[in-house]
Image (cartoon, rainbow, N blue to C red):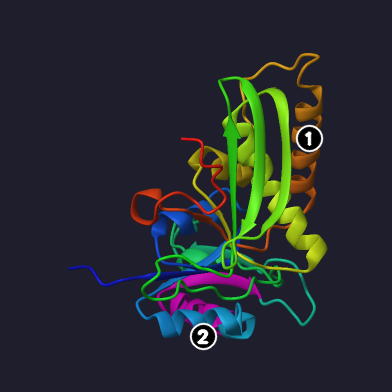
Amino acid sequence: MKAKKYYVVWAGFAPGIYDSWEEAEAQIKGFPEAQIRAFTSETEAVEAFRKGFDEKRFYKEVARQVEQLRKEGHTVEWTPPTDGQATKPKIDIRKRGPLNKTTSEPLRDQMAEAVAATPKPALPVIRPKGSGWIEDAIAVDAACSGVPGPMEYRGVYIKTGQQLFHFGPVPNSTNNIGEFLAIVHALGFEEKQGLRLPIYSDSRTARAWVRDRKCKTTLQMDDTNRETFSMINRAEHWLQTHQVNVQILTWDTKKWGEIPADFGRK
């Protein structure tokens, strides 16, 4: 039986602690210079996340590995970053030999991706034992009568069931668009309120669109849904100009039932 793993994402679309590889991978895939590490202990993961990315320890390990490569016969040119420097270290590895060809020997996976500054992380979040989900979080959901049809969405504070925001209904839209707009609305709501709560969505499509910062709907714009497409443009612009520093998590409907923001029309 494989040991349980906890994935710490220091730099990604939504930094935090994840207990599944699927959710963790979604935060780093396509994110430049992502920082992630797996732990087998929940305690170690929380401690590592709270400490943040340890730049000094990281470059100490780089220096150790550089020295080891030199002992193995490589010529390594490496300039460690100085205090305040925000550039990558120069790493050039060459094997001694008649042609002095550059080898494919890596300075371990992360060395070539070293950075001197990292985004401010979100607060560590671990699902409470027993419940399966986090109560101190926001749940979002959308409803659409027909495809396309009238669409509305809302956000709910899970612990109390309080509705935090609601939009719609608007004509000639889709459920996926509503789920996408609901997540972005929740992100903007949290920024304005100074919150960093996890956001739950049961829509895989909407979470992927948010991750890619693009609403990939095939719906065509016309006079009936111009307002919706205007909101889509604003949502995409928000995602492209803001750093997402909260966790966007999967609501497991099979295990937990309908998401708390559900409109109850199924």
**What x and y, as percent, mark residue 226?**
80, 22
Q: Secondary structure at mark 1?
A: helix
**What x and y, as percent, mark residue 216?**
62, 29
**What x and y, as percent, mark residue 155?**
65, 52
- Kind of residue indicated by mark 2: Glu
**Height in image: 50 above or below 220?**
below
Find out whether residue 64 is within the magenta segment.
Answer: yes
- Kind of residue indicated by mark 1: Met
Q: Nearer the viewer, mark 1 or mark 2?
A: 1
On the rendered image, what quadrant is the N terminus found in?
A: bottom left
Residue 163 found in image quarter: bottom right
Q: Earlier in the sequence, mark 1 or mark 2?
A: 2
The kind of secondary structure the magenta stretch mainly shows is helix
Disc 2 packing (10 Å; few <14; some 14–19; many ≥20): few
Q: CA distance from mark 1 to mark 2?
A: 40 Å
- The residue identified by callout 1 is 231
Residue depicted at x 34% and y 55%: 255
- The residue identified by callout 2 is 47
Residue 167 found in image quarter: top right
Residue 44 found in image quarter: bottom left
Specify the farthest residue to the left.
1
Toward the viewer: 26 or 158? 158
The span shown in magenta is: 58-79
Residue depicted at x 69% and y 16%: 220
**What x and y, as percent, mark residue 150?**
66, 25
Q: Secondary structure at mark 2?
A: helix
Toward the viewer: 248 or 152? 152
Residue depicted at x 36% and y 73%: 130
Residue depicted at x 69% and y 70%: 118
Toward the viewer: 149 or 126? 149
